Amino acid sequence: MNYLHILLLCLAGLVLPAIARSQISTVQDQSLDSLINWLGEHIYDPADSIYVLAHSALYQAMESGTPAQAAKCHNNLAAWHYGHAESEDQDSILHHDQKALEYFLLAGDTASAAGAYLQVGSDLVSSNEYQEAQNLIFQGIELYEQLEMPDRIAGAYAKLSFLFRNMGDLDKAMEYGERSVTMFRNDAPEGYVVEPLLYLISAYTDAGQADAAIDRANLALEEITNAGGKEEDPGGYLRVMGLRGKAYESKEQLNLAMADYEEAWAFAKSLVEKEEQADGYKGDIGSILRKQGKYTEAIPYLEDYLNHLSERNYSATTWQQFLSLAECYEQTNQPNKALQATQRGWTVRDSMLNGRINALETELEVKYATAQKEETIASQEARIGQQRRIVWLALGGLLLLACIAVIIWLAYRRNQRLAKALANKNEENEVLLKEIHHRVKNNLQVISSLLSLQSAQVQDPTVRSSVLESQNRVRSMALIHQKLYQNDNLAAIEMKDYFETLGRSILKSFGASSKHIELVTPMEELELDVDTAIPVGLIVNELITNSMKYAFGDKQEGEIRISLQREHPDQLTLVVADTGPGLSATAEESDPASGFGSQLVHLLTIQLNGQLETKQEKGMVTTLRFEPTKNEAA
């Protein structure tokens, strides 16, 4: 696989500059600064070439060695991941925002560094790392106070309102939110006050003060209108409508809430290329339908919403949507699905609570340490008088003990330095390895984007299908590297989670025809090293693709099962099965893409020293038996 990585990196290095040159020709001044500024204005455009251009700009900035330019490039890439529904990758957003902070500090740009502290803090709030988020936001506030920038401090107070609301400290959330609103309305142009108003709407709703929340929502809509309307601030408008709907819902004014949710959904669909990219607004509509007793109608809305979040980080309230879905399943006589949804909901809720508990524990530890220090000082002052009377008698013994202590301390310091150096080296190697996997994943994502651009230009359905299948193969490899840098274990992949994520991605690529297909993974958690996981992932990718192409009609219901079991220490068994009629020999011979897929599966089976068996048993069942590597067998 090392040769494949090198090939992809070389291809990216050759293609990116060519695409960048063709796009930059639309900018009058073709300097790097002009390209960066142009990208900042167009980063939310739907074209895949924007992502390629943003990486090209980053490569040029890194070559020029200018920290300020590199920081702005990382800001653009973070914004791209945030603003594109096909990504919304919280890990990549945090990575690029942290890099931007690092380069702003290197450039000595204090104002931009302060803003970067706030942005990284906000990212960490979304990851439930509340204590570190709080520290970074206060660092940003300290810099803004040194620069005497009250409007920026008002923005920082808005971030604190967001933080404390997520931590469940609603009093502080409302306090900092109101302070931010007051400062913005005194010192900032129209429109800036919308952000803290959004956080206040949520905080007041959570605190049971729905009327105050609705009042702040109406004020936010007034500010948006005065600043140019919803077309000028589509994100703010969508959030206000959704949050005002929450406030109405808390007052049981369901019709008003439904009107706000449907308006937000309709407007969101007008902003995106694909309707499913706006599925994030279906959760609230499903919740209203559930409260109205329309359980059957609510289920697809809630399922689409949770599927929309499955490739992104869950929010603090996602667990409630799982429980709502469980209730709908229960009311429509689907007990197994109800149990699964309930378990998922409580799992998500526990994860959110653990983040809050860790933050509170850290705060309590600081308070306890402070109290202990004050108590120790008082105790020591009481003992000083007694120690003065005996100091001369103990001087000789103390000198002897001091000599011994110095010897022990020197030995300890030497060992400590060696241990620290070794730990630092290990940490550097781990960070470097994660960075390598992250860059490989990004380059594979670039290749996937290029294939997507190519498929859009192809008219022949057969050729387009082949290009899309190649895109799925690239995504299956990119997913391996994403899992590696996200996990603590950099040498192995947990295959059950990998199969679930890969399967959902492939089903999603088939569009509406996949909605009736259920993917199940009846297996225990099992780890494989990367050299084994990649060919296994490619084989599973081909088998799922064949099942979707030949086993099911456009509206046929069915099931695809994937399992990987350790039969005994010297053998692993992979089974991919579907409930369709199976892939006929005629179909195999007539479809070139499918023939290539079969050849690929055959070659990968040889690479694994495995045996492949295909049979009909209530559908097509493909079994691959192969020996694990020495590390896996151990």
Image (cartoon, rainbow, N blue to C red):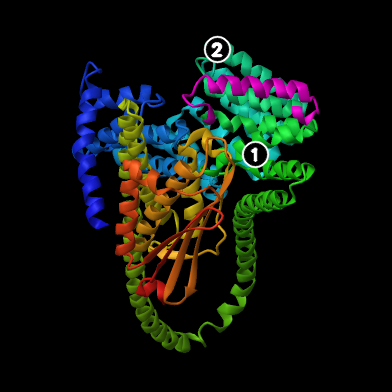
Q: Which mark is residue 329?
A: none
Q: Left or right: 21 with respect to 123?
A: left
- The location of residue 181, given as percent across then percent down, is 61, 24
Which residue position holds label 1?
A: 165
Which residue position holds label 2?
A: 229
Where does the C terminus fall, quadrant-wise?
bottom left
- The location of residue 243, given as percent across then percent down, is 66, 27
- The location of residue 307, given as percent across then percent down, is 57, 40
**Residue 555 lies within the magenta run:** no
- Three-letter amino acid code of the residue under disc 1: Arg
Residue extending farthest to the front is 586
Q: Nearer the viewer, residue 287 or 614?
A: 614
Identify the secondary structure beneath mark 1.
helix
Which segment did they paint magenta?
Answer: 249-276
- Three-letter amino acid code of the residue under disc 2: Gly
Where does the N terminus fall, quadrant-wise?
bottom left
| Measured Cα–Cα span from mark 1 to mark 2 | 27 Å
Magenta span: chief secondary structure: helix
